[in-house]
Amino acid sequence: MCALLSAAVGGGPARLDEVLRRYRDDPATELLAVFLDDEPIGVAGYERRADRIVLLHIATSPRGRGVGRRLVARIRRDDPTLPIVAETDRSALGFYSALGFTATSLGEKYPGVERFQVCLPASDDSN
């Protein structure tokens, strides 16, 4: 699971340790994993705030098998009345768009790298 989370986090061992500590110590955060034959194939971490759910990290291996979709659906079930937001790069926009997220450019946050905020609106299932 650490390899998948490391892929989502980037940085290296010190950064991974910092992120794992946050998931362990901060009750507003949760780390989910999907396993196949005792092997992790997907991981997602999020933070629940009063007005939204912030998707902090998501990674799957292999890609294109619906694991990421299932992870986002599980997070949505946590509280469908809250929107889910995330920050991502251009290469992941297709994934988020297919799930119903809308994207807004944040501009070039790093030299040569345009970042986007994506948002999945709150569900209107109040019935």
Image: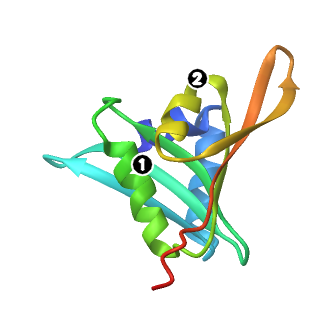
Counting from the top left corner in percent of width and height, residue 92 is at: 56, 30
Q: Relative to 42, is 121 on the left or the right?
A: right
Quarter of the image for the N terminus: give it: top left
Number of marks present in the image shown: 2
Counting from the top left corner in percent of width and height, residue 71 is at: 40, 54
Question: Disc 2 or 1, which lies upstream in sequence?
Answer: 1
Q: Which mark is residue 43?
A: 1
Pick the front one: 121 or 15: 121
Classify 10 Å Cα crowding around label 2: few (below 14), some (14-19), many (20 and above): few
Quarter of the image for the C terminus: give it: bottom left
Report the residue at 59% width, 46% height from top: 101
Counting from the top left corner in percent of width and height, residue 30 is at: 52, 66
Where 67 falls versus 26 (above or below)? Answer: above
Q: Relative to 45, is 108 on the left or the right?
A: right
Residue type at mark 2 is: Ser
Task: Name the residue that disc number 2 marks.
Answer: 91
Q: Quadrant of residue 108?
A: top right
